[in-house]
Image: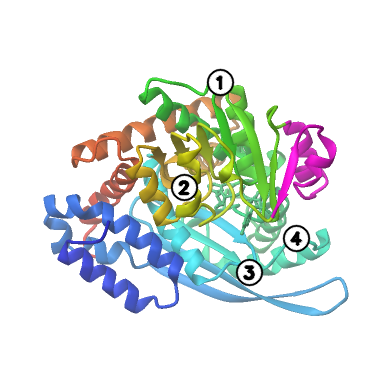
């Protein structure tokens, strides 16, 4: 699909001119603008009020030096980012990513997508994202702590419980959030819900750790039900072995599916008997090891170095590792292997060619901003609990999460239908997320 509407084409040309050398951001904007064609045609007030020009331009972006001292006493310098993309419907909200691949383009693509995702949850959260090119892998706890303290010392002047509430993402888990929260509290002398993904002993929410993976499976459950089927007896191919992948594997299995693969950036494991998650958790969460150790420990399983799992035959695919991990060629392999359902646990894991292949070949496809919104939705629930000074039970949070995922699916289906793209969840998620933000921006004047 290419842009045909002159207004949208003009906006996209400006995005290309203003953001050269930012391929991930350009890719995310193009994919979203393509979905807006029928909306812009039906609602001329959007062009008159410059809504699309404003929505592709972050409200603010900060970039900063993060100096820290390693265990050898040597000073290291990383680069920190925070993009505050859109606050029309609530304080900026979105994760922090610590990974060597982080740069302005990656942070802007993630922040842009986050706006629509947060809107879809129906909770009052604007969109933001941040992070650093720091690599926590191979660092000691003390080094990670010194880095986190330096990072948040600078970021603290830009965030706050009513302004911008960061969370975790790749490379930022409970350990990192704890170090950053402690330092923020010390700097501000206040105990507020400024970060989510906190530990349970200091304001975290039950079920936050599980939320993205569980939410992904709740969304897939709705997709399957919409086509008159369920997880029961289905073979599931899953990538990644981090937070999202682990809990997606657990919930998919609980719902009756058989998950046969997981991966990390080195390769993938295949277990025809269904992944034994206790072994994966021990390797990844306890020993912080590599996924290949699974094949050494579980008889009958195998490990393939340097490849992704998309050649394995399945009914359902759940990419849960990172952006652009599933190419057009991979999509063809999945389709040839009989895959009929795909939902994205990671952010933008499928390339545009892969998404096109799914849509053209009758694969029911759930895009990230809808399918993985369970994580940020539960972060929103953590914010609510912090404001109420209350903690809900695991079951209560999980129930709300299920309700939110069912509602997101409904919003996507209805938005796609309204603009003549029945069952196209890409269109539905983009439009469903967009219209609420656009209406809020229209109501708030030129800001
Ligand atoms: P983790 O850091 O816990 O896990 C990331 C996983 O992806 C690891 O298995 C990692 O392997 C793998 N991976 C990372 N980079 C690459 C790469 N270049 N090629 C292949 N594999 C790679 O992160 P999360 O599970 O939290 O996040 C995974 C995805 O889900 C991201 O896209 C994130 O933005 C998205 N997401 C996460 C949410 C959350 O609540 N955590 C919420 C919504 C979306 P290795 O160990 O080798 O690096």
Q: Residue, x 53% and y 40% (percent of image)? A: 318
Q: Which residue is mark 4?
A: 137
Q: Is residue 246 visible?
A: no
Q: Residue, x 41% and y 42% (percent of image)? A: 370
Q: Is residue 219 above or below residue 83?
A: above
In this figure, what is the number of numbered marks? Answer: 4
Q: Which residue is mark 1?
A: 233
Q: Which residue is mark 2?
A: 331
Which of 240 and 428 lies nearest the eye of the viewer?
240
Residue 255 location, quadrant = top right
Secondary structure, mark 3, is loop
- The spot of residue 134 in percent (x, y) is 68, 68
Tell me: is circle 3 under 8 Å from ligand 1: no
- The spot of residue 213 in percent (x, y) is 57, 37
Mark 3 or mark 2: which is in front? 2
Distance, label 1 to label 3, CA atoms, is 41 Å
């Amino acid at each position: 699909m290419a842009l045909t509407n002159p207004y949208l084409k003009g906006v996209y040309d400006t995005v290309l001119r203003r953001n050269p050398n930012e391929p991930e951001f350009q890719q995310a904007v193009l994919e979203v603008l393509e979905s807006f064609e029928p909306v812009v045609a039906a609602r001329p007030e959007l062009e008159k009020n410059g809504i699309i020009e404003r929505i592709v331009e972050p409200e603010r972006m900060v970039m900063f030096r993060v100096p820290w001292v390693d265990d050898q006493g040597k000073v290291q310098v990383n680069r920190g980012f925070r993009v505050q993309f859109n606050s029309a419907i609530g304080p900026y909200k979105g994760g922090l990513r610590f990974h060597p691949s982080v740069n302005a383009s990656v942070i802007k693509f993630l922040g842009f997508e986050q706006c629509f995702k947060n809107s879809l949850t129906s909770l009052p959260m604007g969109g933001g994202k941040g992070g650093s090119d720091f690599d926590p892998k191979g660092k000691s706890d003390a080094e990670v702590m010194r880095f986190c303290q330096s990072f948040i010392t600078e970021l603290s002047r830009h965030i706050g419980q009513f302004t911008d509430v960061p969370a975790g993402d790749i490379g930022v888990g409970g350990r990192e959030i704890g170090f950053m929260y402690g330092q923020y509290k010390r700097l501000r002398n206040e105990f507020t819900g400024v970060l989510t993904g906190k530990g349970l002993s200091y304001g975290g929410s039950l079920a936050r750790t599980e939320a993205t993976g569980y939410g992904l499976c709740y969304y897939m459950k709705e997709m399957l039900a919409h086509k008159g089927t369920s997880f029961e007896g289905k073979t599931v191919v899953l990538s990644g072995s981090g937070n999202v992948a682990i809990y997606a594997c657990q919930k998919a299995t609980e719902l009756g599916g058989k998950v046969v693969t997981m991966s990390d950036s080195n390769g993938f494991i295949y277990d025809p008997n269904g992944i034994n998650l206790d072994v994966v958790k021990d390797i990844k969460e306890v020993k912080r090891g590599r996924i290949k150790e699974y094949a050494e420990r579980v008889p009958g399983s195998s490990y393939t170095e340097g490849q992704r799992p998309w050649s394995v035959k399945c009914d359902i695919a759940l990419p849960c590792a990172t952006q652009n991990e599933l190419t057009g060629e991979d999509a063809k392999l999945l389709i040839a292997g009989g895959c009929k359902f795909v939902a994205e646990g990671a952010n933008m894991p499928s390339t545009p060619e892969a998404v096109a292949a799914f849509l053209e070949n009758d694969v029911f496809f759930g895009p990230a901003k809808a399918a993985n919104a369970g994580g940020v939705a539960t972060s929103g629930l953590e914010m609510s609990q912090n404001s109420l000074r209350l903690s809900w039970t695991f079951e209560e949070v999980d129930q709300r999460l299920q309700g939110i995922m069912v509602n997101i699916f409904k919003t996507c289906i209805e938005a796609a239908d309204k603009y003549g793209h029945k069952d196209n969840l890409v269109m539905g998620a983009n439009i469903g997320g967009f219209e609420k933000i656009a209406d809020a921006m229209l109501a708030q004047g030129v800001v």
